[in-house]
Image (cartoon, rainbow, N blue to C red):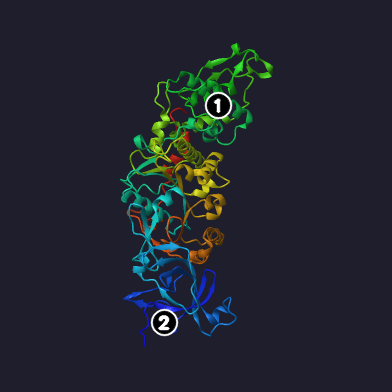
Amino acid sequence: MAERDPTCIGRVRHVLGATVTVALDPELAGVAPIYRGHLQPVGQIGSLVRIPQGLVDLIATVNLVGIAELSGLLPPADTVQHDDRWLQVQLLGEIDRGTGRFQRGVGSYPGLDDPVHFATPRQLLSIFPSPNEHYLRLGRLAAAEEVPVCLDASKLVTRHCAVVGSTGSGKTSAVAALLQGFVNGGWRAANIVVIDPHGEYSRALEGNASVRSVLADGNDRLRVPYWALPAAEILRVFAGPGGGATFVNRFAELVAAARREFVERADWLSLDPTSVTADTPIPFDIRPIWHRLDYENRETRRNKSDPATVCQLDPGDAAALRGAQFAPYGPGGQPPHQGPMFNVYGTAPNVFRLGLIDPQLRFFQEPNGTAEGPDPLVGVVQEWLGGTQPVSVLNFSGVPSAAADLAIGVVLNLIFELSLYSEAGGPGIGRASPTLIVLEEAHRYLGATASALTRDSANRIAREGRKYGIGLLLVSQRPTELPDTALAQCGTLIALRLSNTSDQGTIRGALPDSVAGLAGVLPSLRTGEAIVSGEALVLPVRALLDMPNPMPLAEDPSLAPWRAEPQLPEVAPALAAWRGTYENDND
């Protein structure tokens, strides 16, 4: 009597398209047999099995496990045997035994009563490539931890990727480990830009990345010049969304004139001044514009219709943000009279001034272009791209979210625009040198509540970026808040634990039909475990992700201070920082 194959776990009982039902061998103890000293978790959702078919082995993934008396009838059968234990598996591809090569799809389907085997680690190694100059290690198979899971680096970068998971599932650690893999894997000339709204990645990439913060000093400061924004967005940064239509229109008029005047003086620009608008990214000095608006808002005259009769007591100082002083208007229609625009702008000029002296917004006021040159945007974009470092971390923590969102929109828009005009094989970014943008809290910038500039820039990269060598890595704990178009454009999906039912449904819809059943395990995944699917890897898998070293600054706060001696909370430094906009030498 022939000896039983120790890797055989059951027989094919039903075949319905790519879905195969397997009756487990009655002699199989449990669903985790021991083979060569190791447990083989064939009953785990996401584990792989093989079905020999002549010269090929069909490879399938487990998506259901059950007992017949509990599950009822299994389509298309009318009856099932009492107490049958079974697996439902989904066919994914086949291994050619002669060459050892794996390919997606199957050329033939299994027959009834064909034996089904668990896949050994040695066989799985022929499916999953090892880390090399083309493949980036992500982690290891959850069902066979000695088998590495690697991603095709080219497809990961150029065809977009999404990393989703609830808070605490290991999402930030997974992204940090990926970035460390690029840094340590030989991609020394990579262009990876990390948009970091919470300051989490600098520790994980210390020594291997350019880290710039909006609140830093000196060479570490992140600079996003306000003049790179459209006029309306500049006003939104410094004065908020209010101000009224008259104030907004007058500001745009003055900005357009200032930009044209700079073009006429600049040696390094060859533009027709008449083609310059309020939104053309040309340097200009914003302080004289504030001074003019404040002047108009408080001007008094002896003769209201004659500008030459202005009752100015002190001209003020635009550079020092000190407004002009005027004689108070007289009572009962007596001179001096209110100027034509007196108080038309309301409190908007004063709010505007407070924005200009706010230390949290000073990163918007650098650099200032000069007529002699050079072009200040060249140095700024090189800083954003990290200079000679493979990774650039742009830390936007510590500033108002509305201002940070607008600054991020400028970064995304300029990087994409530069990629449009960079040719393959030439200088520049994009086709010449692909760029990956890691967008933390992606739902903030792609959703309907984001500023128009940021939302349009991010969605434009999602839709068109792969054509021009700009890839997106979207990181979010709320996939339901990501636009369907953006998520549909992601060629690779890394889904960690998700507790919310609607988020699980979004990911289930994004997974291929052949492995949609894997979405059922999303709420029970361990920290650092994920369902990985898409173009960057050969098969959808359940994987244990590698942990970064060092870790990002994303761990939960410690409760150790609760064990200390009770004392009054010291909030004065935090209040001083919060009130920084009002504590200025110019006040």
For label 1, the residue is: 277
Q: Is residue 204 visible from the viewing direction of this image?
A: no
Q: Quickly name the residue at label 2.
A: 28
For mark 2, give the secondary structure: loop
In this rendered view, identify the residue nearer to me: 332 or 85.
85
User: Is residue 445 shown above or below 146?
Assistant: above
Q: Position of residue 63 (x, y in %)?
A: 49, 69
Q: For the residue marked with disc 2, what is the amino acid?
A: Leu
Report x, y in % for residue 121.
35, 69
Q: Quick check: 245 above or below 327?
A: below
Query: Crowding at label 1, few (<14), some or many (≥20) Cα neighbours within 10 Å?
Result: some
- Relative to 356, is 327 on the left or the right? right
The three-letter code of the residue at mark 1 reads Thr
- Residue 420 located left or right of residue 250: left
* Labels 2 and 1: the sequence-earlier one: 2
Q: Is residue 517 left or right of residue 249?
A: left
Judge whether 203 appears above or below 416 on screen: below
Task: Determine whether label 2 and label 1 are within 8 Å by CB.
Answer: no
Task: Give the image location of residue 308, x and y in percent.
Answer: 59, 11
| Mark number, residue 513 | none
